[in-house]
Image (cartoon, rainbow, N blue to C red):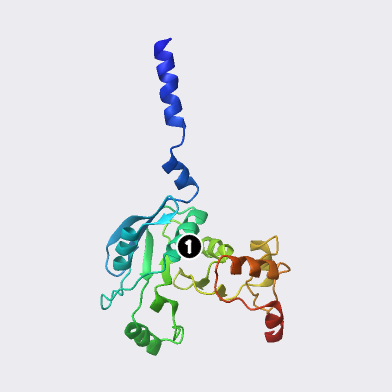
Amino acid sequence: AAPVAAFLSLLGAVAAPTSTQTAVANGGTRTISLYHAHRKDSISVTFRRNGSYDSAALGQLNYFLRDWRNDQQTRMDPRLFDVIWESQRGAGSSAPVIVLSAYRSRTTNAMLRARSRAVAKESQHMYGRAMDMRMPDANMHRVREVALRLQRGGVGWYGSSNFVHLDVGSVRAWPRLSYDHLARLFPDGKSVHIAADGRVLPGYEEARALVASRGGGYVPTLAQVKEKS
């Protein structure tokens, strides 16, 4: 009987989740693995522990995501790492995220803007709030849709280069999706995304209140949307 009792005790210890395991399952402990496409280096760091940001880990990420052209760095917005972590988890990706662009100094942004109209004058990259990235083991269309559903910031799709821009600025998407596509992504109608034809889903105001309650960026009122359309 003693060996059986010992085995059952051991089984219970293995099966019972620890507080750390529970935190991981609930997203309270989050680890992000990145590979920098330009510098060819990588990092894997736990940036959240039991629901709180780890300042040392954030410092490591600030350095890793520095402007690769001139080595300048900034304080990255930690909410960006949450968006990336949630997008990766939702898309079923586990490989290191490939970083194409993260922090950009004003000098770098001005240089890129001179080359392309696609670069915003006040790019979120300059404020440490954005990343252009690719998940090598996931369909990037899927990654885009998962990120859109989060409604935590901007989601840009660059199909010809197969990468997605994510930021924690105001909730927006480019290019805009069709109304039918939005309706499929948000079957409950609660979205602040504006369709390509200027229409919004029926739960727009509810979604707007939700975004505002969690400190999201500016979202126009329904009246303002209709005025522009």
Image coordinates of residue 53 in percent, x first then y, are 40, 58
- Quarter of the image with the C terminus is bottom right
Q: Residue at x 41, y 68 (%)?
A: 77
Q: Residue at x 66, y 62 (%)?
A: 186
Residue 8 located left or right of residue 75: right
Residue 115 is drawn in which quadrant? bottom left
Outermost bottom residue: 114
Q: Residue at x 53, y 64 (%)?
A: 147
Outermost top residue: 1
Q: Which class describes the residues within 10 Å of circle 1: few (<14), some (14-19), or many (20+)?
A: many
Q: Residue at x 56, y 74 (%)?
A: 172
Q: How many marks?
A: 1
Image coordinates of residue 96 in percent, x first then y, are 37, 57
Residue 214 located left or right of residue 115: right
Q: Nearer the viewer, residue 124 or 29?
A: 29
- Quarter of the image with the N terminus is top left
Q: Can you say whether 140 is above or below 103 in the image?
A: above
- Pointer 1: what residue? 83
Q: Secondary structure at mark 1?
A: helix
Q: Nearer the viewer, residue 170 or 214?
A: 214
Image coordinates of residue 167 in percent, x first then y, are 47, 71
The amino acid type of the residue labelled 1 equals: Val
Outermost right residue: 202
Image coordinates of residue 184 in percent, x first then y, are 67, 62
